């Protein structure tokens, strides 16, 4: 392993601290970063970081093998149920359990629970040696459902279900186009770049050159992009986080429980239905991760940049990044509990 890989938790921790300190103490940095946009509500620095982070992983996907994933109904159905039934319901329950007296933070957490992960999960899955092809398919599936279901689920969990339970209600005004735009920019561009690299590279030089020469050269950029994204994200929100330490703790506790419970339950489900280590890992990370970019953008657009809802969205990656990095190592440690994958049958 390279030095970067071996000490990954150290580098991630340092990137988080650097971003927080820079956002808190460097005059004008937050304003300067916020002024750089791809389009309204989408940060250019975060987009660049995610593109650099995701491209090498998506370039590794063998797109000619995606049919082996799309034919696995156990994986697809489990993922949809975990992401669009279990995930939002678990976050709703935790938000009301831990923040009954703080409606702004509670609403922000529910929004985080609705924003299923379509970006960083690809990196966590790759670090944990999950199934790359399965991750690509599940992320694409989540993206489609995100466009179709986000606004409706937001209305259900913020207005309808609380009304049925006799609880306070809230509103969420977000268009399907704004969600689709976020999906297309944050996932669509790196996905197309990775797919074209694979197709054109193999066509020009062959699969052996592509996988043994090209991919090792671009591979390290995943972690460079990850560290850059973390620094920028925490610099953008450093002042908001460090100015409200007690509120951050209140928000962090249900998030910590959420990430751990969703990952553990999904991982156990994958093992229980016989998916094998690689796909169980992919199922777990795609169910546990959340799309913090979308959650923050929706909270800011609906409630304002200084709102409690926006702060809850910001705290999401503060907890998600270190927790899911730790779960990468838990996954690798649990690998020996799975039976080895059967050797492929060679047909004449």
Image (cartoon, rainbow, N blue to C red):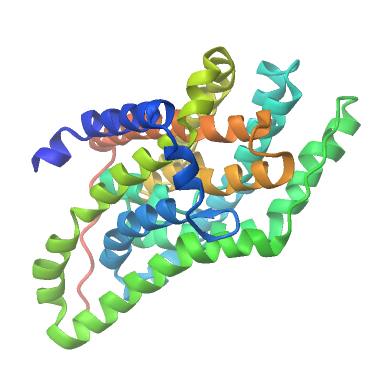
- Residue 141 in percent (x, y) is at 54, 61
The answer to whether residue 111 is left or right of residue 253 is right
Quarter of the rendering occupied by the C terminus: bottom left
Residue at 58%, 35% (x, y): give it: 313
- Evaluate whether residue 71 shows in this view: no
Task: Pick the quarter of the image with the N terminus.
Answer: top left
Residue closest to the eye, 245 or 220 = 245
Q: Is residue 32 visible?
A: yes
Find the residue positioned furthest to the front.
Answer: 27
With respect to residue 154, does 346 lie above or below? below
| Near-viewer residue (11 or 255) | 11
Q: Residue 194 sits in which quadrant?
A: bottom left
Q: Is residue 278 depicted above or below 189 in this figure?
A: above
Residue at point 60% right, 38% down? 112
Q: Nearer the viewer, residue 57 or 287?
A: 57
Residue 203: % across, % down = 21, 87
Residue 142 as seen in the image, left or right of residue 317: right
Residue 263 x, y percent position in the rendering: 46, 35
The residue sitting at 62% across, 35% down in the picture is 310
Q: For residue 218, what is the image quadrant?
A: bottom left
The answer to which of 222 and 203 lies nearer the viewer is 222
Task: Spot the residue most to the top.
Answer: 246
- Name above or below for residue 337 compared with residue 144: above
């Amino acid at each position: 392993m390279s030095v970067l890989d071996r000490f990954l938790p150290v580098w991630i921790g340092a990137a988080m601290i650097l971003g927080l300190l820079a956002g808190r103490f460097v005059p004008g940095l937050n304003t300067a970063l916020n002024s750089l946009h791809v389009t309204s509500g989408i940060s250019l620095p975060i987009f660049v970081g995610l593109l650099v982070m995701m491209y090498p992983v998506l370039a590794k996907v063998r797109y000619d093998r995606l049919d082996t994933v799309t034919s696995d109904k156990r994986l697809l159905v489990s993922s949809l149920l975990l992401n669009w039934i279990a995930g939002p319901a678990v976050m709703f329950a935790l938000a009301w359990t831990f923040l009954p007296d703080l409606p702004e933070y509670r609403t922000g957490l529910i929004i985080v629970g609705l924003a299923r992960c379509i970006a960083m999960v690809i990196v966590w899955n790759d670090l944990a040696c999950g199934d790359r092809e399965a991750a690509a398919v599940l992320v694409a599936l989540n993206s489609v459902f995100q466009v179709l279901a986000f606004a409706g689920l937001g209305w259900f969990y913020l207005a309808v279900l609380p009304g049925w339970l006799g609880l306070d209600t809230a509103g969420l005004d977000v268009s399907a186009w704004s969600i689709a735009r976020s999906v297309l920019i944050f996932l669509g561009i790196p996905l197309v770049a990775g797919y074209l690299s694979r197709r054109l590279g193999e066509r020009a030089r062959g699969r052996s050159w592509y996988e043994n020469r090209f991919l090792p050269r671009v591979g390290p950029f995943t972690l460079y992009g990850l560290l850059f994204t973390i620094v920028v994200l925490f610099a953008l929100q450093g002042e908001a986080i460090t100015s409200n330490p007690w509120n951050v703790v209140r928000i962090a506790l249900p998030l910590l429980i959420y990430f751990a419970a969703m990952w553990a339950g999904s991982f156990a489900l994958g093992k229980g239905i016989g998916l094998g280590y690689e796909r169980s890992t992919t199922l777990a990370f795609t169910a546990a991760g959340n799309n913090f970019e979308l959650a923050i953008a929706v909270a800011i657009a609906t409630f304002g940049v200084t709102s409690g809802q926006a702060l809850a969205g910001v705290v999401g990656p503060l907890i998600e990044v270190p927790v899911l990095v730790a779960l990468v190592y838990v996954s690798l440690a649990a690998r020996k509990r799975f039976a080895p994958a059967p050797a492929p049958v060679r047909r004449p």
